[in-house]
């Protein structure tokens, strides 16, 4: 998503040239390209698929809507397995229209995980609950902190459900370091993502994630926390940023790799 | 601030007509009107000044900047005392330019409170640390949760330093109910403010606070929490909202009073 202006073949080629060993993919471009074709492409390029983004949106009250969400998440698990990644990232979903019941929404997520966790584990895929910044609590994700994500995940085995740690979402939280240790001890850090916090935030607050090094986040400190928690998996950089999308994708990818080396290696 | 389009005399008259018994004032319009004149106006109108907003911005590293901030906060305390309110709300300040050190910034706030708390208490004024939503952590307020605010406040006597509970800032936080109980037990809920959470957020995320009842916040639940914590002080409605500011101020004030009755009484 950081360089969504690149097609999948362009992305695979650019990663190869830069020595980027893995890539997190999003479902929409994979579906557009064809899941099997995408799997072949990354395999032929020697590129690991670190995660698939994203499943989730599991907070519906309406029975039909809920059934559709579960079916879509099973499809996402199948796509992840086909791509050869072991991790499907979940954005849990916001409040249903008119609802003010955060607790109820979080409980419906737990119910859904009880169905999806065994399905995913049976296909070699782990679910990663991603707590999103509290500014998304109403409309995208009622899971706002690592503590909440772990409270949900720990109801299930770690090989079924863990968490995604993204600096953009947790950097402000003074309880996050202890929660990272908790997640690591339980083998539940299923991915680690970097994005920087820059202001002012854009309207809608979706596409203002800062390039690594441009903002308020001490990347090396967070890297140190997940390292100390025993995490040895891939480090992803996930930027939604209109200014970056408007630039040449290969240039942005090279810049991002350089920023990673400078700020987070 | 909810009806900043009204002059202070218009505001006092409209509150009188509507039976609104108190008002939280901001420093700038009070200074423009004259502190003594404003104090006389509200006294003559029989209107209580619930709080003065705001002091704070206490995170500077530079010595001169820090001295200026402390002097400005002492002036704010003096203004609060002159207006006859016992509470000065503090917005603690963001990260200094180029800094990524949230912990250091929070510690400098504690240092400043050690100087300002006794000064305020000596003039009959309590300081209320307002945790601001985590989306303001970089540029306005490094104190993002009630737990953090109380960790700071509890270093000092409750008659010097407490907290402001604002639904807009804490509604997403599942640990906030326990923190409200903690604050109430310590006599540290120094004010309680209502604003609703509506989306999409506007650019800069400052002026999108929703009218009470328009958004995701269960006002009666939060009212019940502060009531159960023993809070018996005023309930303020504090909305920063471009759409409300563009309307007739007396109409907005009447609507706000009606919404309070409908959703939070």
Image: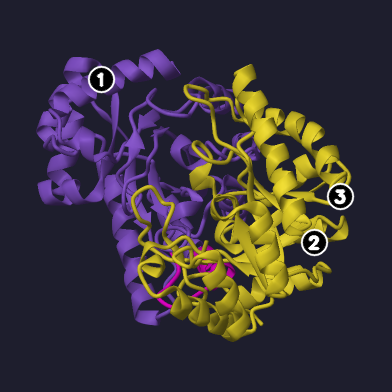
Chain colours: A yellow, B purple
Q: Which is nearer the N-term, disc 3 or disc 2?
A: 3
Q: Nearer the viewer, mark 3 or mark 1?
A: 3
Q: Nearer the viewer, mark 1 or mark 2?
A: 2
Q: Chain of mark 1?
A: B
Q: Which residue is mark 3?
A: A158
Q: Secondary structure at mark 3?
A: loop
- Is residue B138 found left or right of A231 in the rendered image? left
Looking at the rendered image, the quarter that the C terminus of chain A falls into is bottom right
Q: Chain of mark 2?
A: A
Marks 1 and 2, Cα distance to the nearest angstrom? 48 Å
Q: Position of residue A68 (x, y in %)?
A: 63, 27
Marks 3 and 2, Cα distance to the nearest angstrom? 15 Å
- Could you tell me which residue is drawn at 35 percent across and 67 percent down? A246
Q: Secondary structure at mark 2?
A: helix
Q: Chain of mark 3?
A: A
Whether residue A175 is visible: no
- Could you tell me which residue is drawn at 15 percent across and 29 percent down? B249
Q: Which of B219 and B18 lies nearest the eye of the viewer?
A: B219
- Mark 3 surroundings: few (<14), some (14-19) or many (≥20) residues within 10 A: many
Q: Secondary structure at mark 1?
A: helix
- Mark 1 surroundings: few (<14), some (14-19) or many (≥20) residues within 10 A: some
- For residue A230, which quarter of the picture? bottom right
Whether residue B207 is in magenta: the answer is: no
Asked if A156 appears above or below B109 in the picture, the reply is above
- Mark 2 surroundings: few (<14), some (14-19) or many (≥20) residues within 10 A: many
| Boundaries of the magenta span | B94-111
Marks 3 and 1, Cα distance to the nearest angstrom? 51 Å
Q: Which residue is mark 2?
A: A181
Q: Which of A263 and B241 lies nearest the eye of the viewer?
A: A263
- Could you tell me which residue is drawn at 72 percent across and 75 percent down? A46
Query: Residue B255 — which label?
Result: 1
């Amino acid at each position: 998503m950081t360089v969504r202006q690149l097609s999948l073949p362009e992305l695979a080629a650019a990663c190869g040239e830069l020595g980027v060993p893995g890539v997190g993919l999003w479902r929409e471009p994979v579906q557009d390209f064809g899941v099997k074709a995408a799997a072949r492409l990354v395999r032929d390029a020697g590129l690991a698929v670190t995660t698939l983004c994203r499943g989730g949106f599991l907070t519906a009250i309406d029975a039909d809507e809920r059934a559709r969400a579960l079916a879509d998440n099973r499809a996402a698990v199948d796509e992840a397995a086909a791509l050869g990644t072991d991790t499907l990232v979940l954005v849990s979903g916001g409040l249903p229209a008119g609802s003010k019941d955060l607790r109820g929404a979080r409980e419906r997520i737990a119910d859904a995980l009880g169905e999806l966790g065994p399905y995913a584990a049976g296909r070699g895929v782990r679910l990663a609950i991603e707590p999103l910044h509290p500014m998304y609590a109403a409309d995208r994700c009622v899971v706002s902190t690592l503590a909440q994500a772990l409270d949900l995940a720990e109801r299930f085995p770690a090989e079924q459900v863990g968490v995604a740690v993204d600096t953009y979402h947790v950097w402000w939280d003074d309880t996050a370091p202890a929660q990272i240790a908790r997640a690591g001890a339980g083998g539940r850090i299923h991915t680690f993502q970097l994005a920087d916090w820059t202001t002012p935030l854009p309207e809608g607050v979706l596409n203002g994630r800062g390039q690594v090094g441009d903002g308020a986040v001490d990347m090396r400190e967070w890297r140190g926390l997940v390292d100390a928690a025993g995490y040895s998996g891939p480090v992803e950089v996930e930027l939604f940023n209109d200014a970056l999308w408007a630039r040449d994708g290969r240039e942005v990818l090279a810049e991002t790799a350089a920023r990673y080396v400078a700020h987070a290696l």
